[in-house]
Amino acid sequence: MIRVGIVGATGYSGVELIRLLARHPKVEITRLYSSSAEGAELAAVFPHLEQIALPPLQAIDPQAMAQENDIVFLATPAGVSRELSPQLVAAGGKVIDLSGDFRLASAELYQTWYKKQPASDEQLAQAVYGLHEWNEEKIRAARLIANPGCYPTATLLGLLPLAKSGWVEPRSWIIDAKSGVSGAGRGVSLSSHFSEVNENVSAYKVGKHQHTPEIEQELTRHSGVETIVQFTPHLIPMTRGILVTAYGQLTKPVRAEELQDLYESVYSGKPFVRVRPYGSHPRTKDVYGSNYCDIAVHLDQRTGRVIVLSVIDNMVKGAAGQAVQNMNTMFGLAQTEGLLLTPVFP
């Protein structure tokens, strides 16, 4: 059994990790950590977990954590993992970080976009970017995984086949993304207040969302060509789900059949990416509560653009589910272990 510890167990990503790991046949949830609720029982915070036998919340002690767990998940705000992850790795532990502290290879970019002190260059070099379908071999040998952001997961899975093919102008991508409110976390803020969100759709962080450089970094890394994107996120009045609609200018005439064949070939044998029939319209409900990403491509002959639609559950494939998928690979298990969940519908 893999002994698992979770830091930030009282947040949305933390409690989603518990939901997934409690049913995992090869995992024991050994320790739960919280900086604000030491000694409390998690079921007192989340009554829906009452039937699951869980340890009480305890204080953070990196040395003890590395000894008591085979792997530690950090479901923490940005800025926390930068301090904690290096201590855990130095003590012999393995870490999957669900925050943004190790996603960007450049410390300067992190400071610019996150407005926080970055990890050192040496620490950043140790981290492996955990987009499983595109980095499985490096994940297998990693000790520190930077779990991708929710928007980048949906976006990159949708765009990387075309970016790598060279069929799209690398500076032409326009990404329109819409997310449910759970992506804002469990903390109280005016922007996620029911009266503000209900019956309302709004763009936010236009031109300055911190996931922008992450998307650009990975598109550039896999295509070998510097890529700049126009990324605009929107908040919509639902709890879970992300829909990405991305537009790219084709560099040459391409047939619809070629686009479809490209995606089906790239994601053949990738169990959590479902390439839908050409011209489909994936919906967030199609993946709700699951670790799937559904993708469909459209060709607009009139404009010479390709349109990519990509949907995920932001709490599962966009956070906890992808983290468990990465853990499975790090420990030599099938990537699907504990994750073959049928989406919830309606």
Image: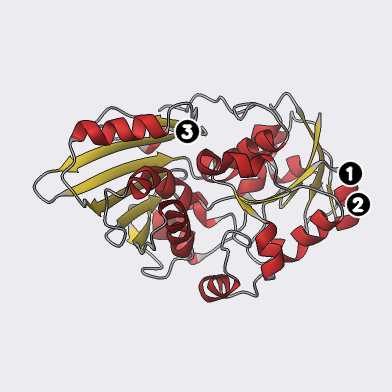
Q: Mark 2 — residue?
A: 64
Front-most of residues 96 and 164: 164
- Whole-percent x, y for residue 173 in the image: 30, 57
Front-most of residues 237 and 225: 225
Label 3 Cα neighbours within 10 Å, binned few <14 / some 14-19 / many ≥20: many
Q: Is residue 262 above or below residue 213?
A: above
First in sequence: mark 1 vs mark 3: 1
Residue 270 visible to the viewer: yes
Q: At x 37% / y 61%, what residue is drawn?
A: 227
Disc sitting over residue 6 in the figure? none
Mark 2 touching mark 1, by CB under 8 A?
yes
Disc sitting over residue 292 in the figure? 3
Q: Mark 1 — residue?
A: 68
Kind of residue at disc 1? Glu
Disc 3 to disc 2, C-alpha distance: 35 Å
Say which element carries label 2.
helix
Q: At x 31% / y 58%, what residue is drawn?
A: 170
Q: Is residue 255 left or right of residue 69?
A: left
Kind of residue at disc 2? Ala
Q: Is residue 232 above or below residue 283?
A: below
